[in-house]
């Protein structure tokens, strides 16, 4: 059941038929084919193309139109789907090769988020646009894998102007970025992580343990690459979606992760709920599930949503801010720094949890910022606050 203010949000958050069309392109429900065809005919091919491009969903919508229109679909939709498929296929082939090499040294390699889903859950590369591939390894294997990546021609770097992009920094922050040129494809970016979710606003005690996730991961047929088990996978993408405040780039594409995992895999919902409650991430997880459930008809049980739901007051406050920012057009600014901080503060299950996120324990602060003297703690708490809000880019 949805409340009155939730129904109002759903009625207003999709601004028009073109946006509704690209939203449905995120769904893998063939039951929406009739509506997709009607919307496509209503807005016309050019508008559909331009709006899909602004959301980087031309491959996804192209696939749906190919299924619906067959030979009548304009060639650019076929070309878009093929282009995305070739690029993502090249990325995944590179990762498969790395996984095979690491397996020879008994190092498991887990593909996270869209990469893992594209390789092991929803295997259509043309419907899986991504800017990079995120990989998870055990903490003890991190340096060894770094060295192997360098041997394979990768360069350790960072696309974030506020980070140095070094192994040493990655050992503190949880991951390092690498890039490599692939012939006929271009630059391939890869992020090697030992922390499965490295958001600044996620408290240290709220993060799933990376080593435990690797130990529970499952094999993917036809490759040495591995995938998080269904419940771990769903929780990880929920936290990732919340990290992007549900609408910042890549925008709508964030919600395809939950959509595909829930629709394609068998979820032990009791186990999933236990994990979300243990990590105290009920509120953030709720909206990661509620949005695709209501917008894409993703089959999330109502009982699960009820179990996770925060107070009516908090739900109303969060939806108000999401509506103001807008779920569509991720390249547009979404939040001011202050609004971004306020929004993230609402995602904590309790005020105590928020305080602990802003002011982590002393040992974590020393490890994160590399200082020893307790006298420096006030300075680094100020720096921590700056990290949480003022250093964000593209918000």
Image: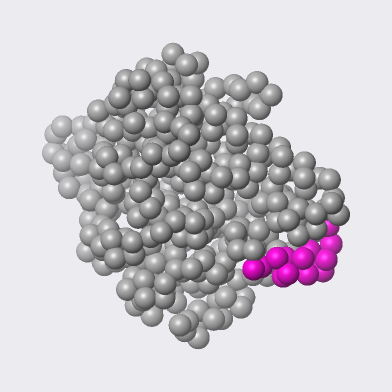
Q: Tell me where residue 80 appears, x and y as whole percent.
A: 74, 43
Q: Is residue 46 left or right of residue 129?
A: right
Q: Position of residue 263 (x, y in %)?
A: 50, 60
| Residue in the picture at 66% in, 51% down | 60
- 138 lies left or right of 292: left
Residue drawn 44% across the image and 56% down it: 265
Question: Does 37 appear above or below 225?
Answer: below
The number of callouts visible is 0
Residue 274 position within the rendered picture, expressed as x and y whole percent measured from the top left: 25, 62
User: Magenta region's main secondary structure?
Assistant: helix
Find the residue positioned furthest to the top.
Answer: 151
Q: Is residue 26 visible?
A: yes
Q: Which of the colour schemes (rainbow, by chain, secondary structure, one colour) is used?
A: one colour
Residue 342, visible in the rendered structure: no
Q: Is the N terminus in the top left, top right, bottom left or bottom right quadrant?
A: bottom left
Residue at the image position 61 percent from the left and 42 percent from the top = 125
Residue 101 quadrant:
top left
In magenta segment, residue 104? no
Asked whether residue 32 is drawn in magenta, I would say yes
Q: Residue at x 38, y 80 (%)?
A: 312
Relative to 393, residue 138 above or below: above
* Vertical arrangement, residue 133 with respect to residue 390, above or below: above
User: Which residues are the magenta region?
Assistant: 31-45
Spot occupied by residue 141 in the image (x, y as percentages of width and height): 29, 26
Question: Which quadrant would residue 107 be assigned to in this image?
Answer: top left
Name of the residue lying farthest toward the bottom? 4
Viewer-closest of 125 and 2: 125
């Amino acid at each position: 059941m949805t409340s009155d203010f939730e129904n109002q949000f759903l009625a207003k958050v999709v601004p028009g038929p073109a946006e509704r069309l690209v939203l449905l392109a995120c769904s893998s429900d063939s039951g929406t084919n009739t509506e997709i065809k009607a919307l496509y005919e209503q807005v016309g091919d050019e508008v559909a193309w331009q709006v899909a491009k602004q959301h980087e969903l031309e491959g996804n919508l192209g696939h749906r139109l190919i299924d619906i229109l067959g030979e009548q679909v304009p060639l650019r939709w076929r070309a878009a789907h093929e282009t995305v498929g070739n690029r993502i296929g090249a990325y995944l082939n590179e990762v498969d090769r790395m996984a095979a090499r690491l397996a020879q040294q008994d190092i498991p390699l887990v593909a996270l988020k869209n990469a893992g889903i594209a390789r092991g859950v929803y295997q259509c590369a043309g419907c899986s646009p991504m800017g990079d591939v995120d990989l998870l390894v055990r903490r003890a294997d991190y340096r060894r894998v770094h060295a192997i990546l360098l041997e394979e021609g990768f360069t350790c770097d960072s696309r974030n102007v506020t980070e140095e992009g070094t192994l040493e920094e990655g050992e503190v922050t949880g991951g390092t970025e690498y890039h490599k040129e692939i012939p006929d494809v271009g630059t391939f970016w890869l992020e090697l992580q030992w922390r499965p979710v490295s958001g600044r606003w996620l408290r240290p005690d709220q993060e799933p343990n990376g080593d435990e996730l690797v130990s529970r991961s499952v094999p993917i047929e036809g490759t040495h690459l591995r995938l998080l088990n269904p419940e771990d996978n769903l929780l990880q993408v929920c936290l990732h979606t919340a990290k992007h405040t549900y609408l910042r780039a890549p925008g709508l594409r964030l919600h395809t992760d939950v959509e595909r995992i829930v629709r394609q895999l068998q979820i032990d919902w009791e186990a999933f709920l236990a994990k979300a409650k243990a990590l105290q991430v009920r509120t953030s997880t709720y909206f990661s599930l509620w949005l695709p459930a209501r917008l894409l008809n993703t089959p999330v049980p109502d009982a699960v949503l009820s179990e996770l739901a925060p107070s009516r007051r908090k739900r109303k406050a969060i939806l108000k801010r999401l509506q103001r920012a807008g779920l569509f057009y991720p390249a547009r600014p979404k939040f001011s720094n202050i609004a971004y901080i306020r929004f993230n503060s609402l995602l904590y299950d309790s005020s105590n949890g928020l305080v602990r996120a802003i002011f982590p324990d002393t040992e974590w602060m020393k490890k994160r910022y590399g200082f020893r003297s307790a006298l420096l703690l006030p300075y680094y708490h100020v720096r921590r606050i700056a990290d949480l809000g003022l250093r964000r880019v593209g918000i």
